[in-house]
Image (spheres, rainbow, N blue to C red):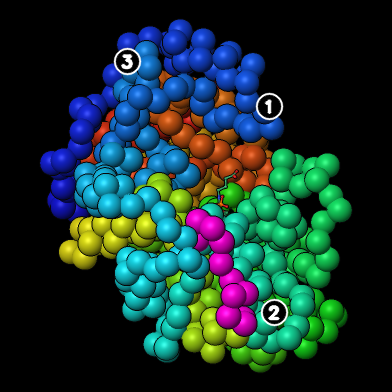
Amino acid sequence: MTETLPALDAATIPQSRHLATAIPGPRSTALHAERASQVTSGFGIALPVFVTRADGGIIEDVDGNRLIDFASGIAVTSLGAGNKRVAQRVAAQLEAFTHTCFMVTEYESFTQVCKWLNENTPGDFEKRTGLFSTGAEAVENAIKIARAATGRAKVLVFDEAYHGRSLLTMAMTAKVNPYKLNFGPLPAEIIRAASANPLRPAQGLAAGAEAALASVEATILEHGADTFAAMVIEPIQGEGGFIVPAPGFIPGLRKLADKYGIVLVIDEIQAGMGRTGTLFASEHEGVAGDLILTAKALANGVPLSAVTGRTELMNAPHAGGLGGTYAGNPLACEAALAVFEQFEDGTLLANARRIEQIAREVLEPLLASTEIVAEVRGRGAMLAIELADAGTLAPRADLAKEISAACHAQGLVTLTCGTHGNVVRLLPPLVIGEELLRDGLDILARAIADAAK
Ligand code: PLZ
């Protein structure tokens, strides 16, 4: 309990919150108006401030404000957005060459990134890896690989799932608004099954893994067990609300996948790469996917994603069947190698666990002291607060919005999520200093207490 987060020695920006203007300030407001005159209105915005620098747990804006970062660019800049070793390796690569296309001429860093993933992802079997650029691309390629390997077409996905915004992955994503609205028709062969949300079990089901698994098996049988190529699950559902599935659910899916010859794809795009206090979130479940997907924090902000899995699956597509111009770009591979180096001594994983301990200390008392916090949940530095009316559990998206707005005004960058939009989530960089973390948590706790009045 006396253990503290190690002080940041290398952050390039003072690690303290500083409010020079209202948030957003006048310069950000002007730049945001200009944006609206040039940029499609199809992109949303959590907090309209324009950034000049970011590192450690701080984002500095054009008005001279220093904001505490509880978002990490949606679980990406886990090592700090200005991480020196990432910057150095990428800079050296920039000097050498920016791109050749791995399908034209090769470079060794691509192989090295694959090797690290093969060796460090769960599963004591021979593996191969393919590199891509975005999370959605990794998901799409996992489906291609599973289809090539099984000769089957269907994909089983779950309630409250998020897998991306591309045409196939938006169909795999559960929430309609904003992700699918007006963007149909959606691709076929995607079947949705019950998840095991401990707070909000699927309609008509008892809470817990057993009922959810029985329902999943019924769904598989209803659609024909031998027609499913893959089932795709997030070890902690991210955009869906930071839902840690009921104990036993993911091991149960492993068994169903084995029973029916379905490829189990674990989407660790948000929860992986140390976020939950282990390198991969599926380690908490004692489960190895046949394929495991990584992106986001894999290269600390340089776009890179990966599909890693059983050799016999990964080698099923014909040569030339997988690829992409930017797939495993050399700048991104160097960034990933710098990330891997920094995971070596275990400090980052210990930080994630310590962040959870401190956050729970500050936030769990709100369960009893207010009537609006239904749950404090998550693992490591992937934590969330669900806002709902006591008793009825009616979701309170309005409160999540109000609390986020109050945090933003105080210089704390928070995000919301959840099928009902009623979840405030915490994704601080794993390198955030303890003082800064506590400052941010105090702001959040006060905002929740105020909203409860
Ligand atoms: N799988 C589990 O969390 C991306 C989405 C933000 P891309 N999550 C953030 C938004 O609103 O677009 C995500 C994820 C999981 C897949 C993805 C998709 O990753 O890199 O955004 O394509």
Main SS category, magenta section: loop
3D distance between C-alphas at marks 1 and 2: 36 Å
Q: Position of residue 150 (x, y in %)?
A: 69, 86
- Does label 2 or label 3 sit earlier along the sequence? 3
Residue at 56% across, 67% down: 323
3D distance between C-alphas at marks 1 and 3: 27 Å
Dot 2 corresponds to which residue?
147
Dot 3 corresponds to which residue?
64
- Foreground of the two, 58 or 140: 140
Q: Which region shows up in magenta?
A: 317-327
Mark 1 and ligand 1: say if the CB distance to the nearest ligand atom is below 8 Å: no
Quadrant of the rendered image containing residue 121: bottom left
| Left/right of residue 83 with respect to residue 44 in the rendered view | left
* Picture layout, residue 177 above or below residue 399: below
Residue at 32% across, 11% down: 20
Quadrant of the rendered image containing residue 17: top left
Dot 1 falls on a residue whose secondary structure is loop
Q: Nearer the viewer, mark 1 or mark 3?
A: 1
In the rendered image, which quarter contains the C terminus? top right
Q: Position of residue 417 (x, y in %)?
A: 58, 43
| Left/right of residue 40 with respect to residue 432 in the rendered view | right
Q: Position of residue 92 (x, y in %)?
A: 24, 50
* Picture layout, residue 270 above or below residue 204: above
- Does label 1 or label 2 sit earlier along the sequence? 1
* Picture layout, residue 346 above or below residue 394: below
Look at label 3 and name its amino acid.
Gly
Look at label 1 and name its amino acid.
Ser
Look at label 2 and name its amino acid.
Arg
